């Protein structure tokens, strides 16, 4: 009888879906996580205000170590008078600085905005390039900024890992990693292709409004029953979004 139980247990273990390498989740669980995010927000949008690819690029550069709300407050006036590289360059570093003084590191950011405007005019005919290698060569533009621009302006399925996504990837075990590059690499590998275009927006918004840094609001979480975080702030509620058939 004991041997039969051991064999049954081993058989059940073999039938249990395996976790996807590098995560705490099975393929089915990952698909369900993003399906629910999709049902909750079918067309997620970034919260940085912009009117074209150039102003998007500038806004993302300015958003480093700043809130989207703070950047939007500063750039409304700036973009009203300078929505092209030529207009931004004509405005000059000092006047750009006047518009963005409320943003952290504004002096260095004003310098970068003027420098990237010069580079766009000189090297790209004033057009924001839809190529990561070209983007990261622009002053003040790193991989995360390039990924945001490629995703939002050019519709490329990139993964822009900010502090929210880095935190969530590790907290819930979806994409553990010490660096944004490690988390990005895992997410690009495990997120189902049909959800990849909007995945970074879903994760950012989830981290900003639900899975918060200090106190996650687990009672509002659409993936609470799937979440593998070691510590939660409340009992796991029933799914807020129906399970897939």
Image (spheres, helix red, strand yellow):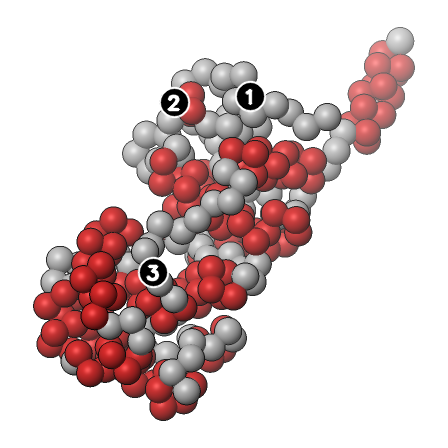
Q: Are marks 3 and 1 in contact (CB under 8 Å)?
A: no
| Residue 216 image position (x, y, % from top left) | 37, 30
Q: Residues within 10 Å of mark 1 (few under 14, many from 20)?
A: some
Q: Which residue is mark 1?
A: 239
Which residue appears at 38% of the width and 22% of the height? Answer: 233
Disc sitting over residue 233 in the figure: 2
Residue 41 position (above or below residue 187): above
Tell me which corner region of the image, top left, top right, bottom left or bottom right, holds residue 155.
bottom right
Name which residue lies at 25% across and 54% down.
72
**Above-or-below relation of 123 to 174:** below
Label 3: element kind: loop
Residue located 50% across and 17% down the image: 237
Q: Mark 3 highlights which residue?
A: 50
**Nearest-to-viewer mark from 3 and 2:** 3
Q: Residue furthest top?
A: 1
Q: Position of residue 206 (x, y in %)?
A: 43, 38
């Amino acid at each position: 009888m004991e041997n039969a139980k051991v064999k049954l247990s081993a058989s059940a273990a073999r039938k249990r879906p395996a976790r996807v390498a590098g995560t705490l989740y099975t393929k089915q669980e990952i698909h369900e996580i993003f399906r629910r995010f999709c049902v909750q927000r079918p067309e997620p949008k970034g919260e940085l205000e912009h009117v074209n690819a150039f102003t998007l690029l500038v806004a993302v550069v300015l958003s480093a170590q700043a809130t989207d709300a703070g950047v939007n407050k500063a750039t409304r006036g700036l973009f009203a008078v300078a929505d092209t590289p030529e207009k931004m360059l004509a405005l000059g570093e000092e006047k750009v600085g006047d518009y963005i003084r409320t943003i952290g590191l504004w002096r260095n950011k004003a310098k970068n905005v003027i420098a990237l405007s010069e580079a766009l005019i000189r090297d790209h005919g004033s057009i924001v390039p839809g190529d990561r290698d070209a983007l990261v060569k622009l002053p003040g533009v790193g991989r995360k900024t390039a990924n945001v621009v490629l995703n939002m302006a050019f519709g490329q399925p990139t993964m822009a890992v900010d502090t929210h996504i880095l935190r969530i990837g590790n907290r819930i075990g979806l994409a553990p990693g010490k660096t944004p590059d490690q988390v990005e690499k895992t997410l690009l590998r495990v997120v189902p292709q049909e959800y990849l275009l909007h995945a970074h927006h879903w994760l950012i918004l989830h981290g900003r409004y639900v899975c918060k840094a200090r106190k996650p609001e687990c009672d509002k979480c659409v993936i609470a029953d799937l979440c593998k975080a070691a510590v939660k702030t409340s009992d796991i509620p029933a799914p807020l979004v129906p399970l897939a058939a």
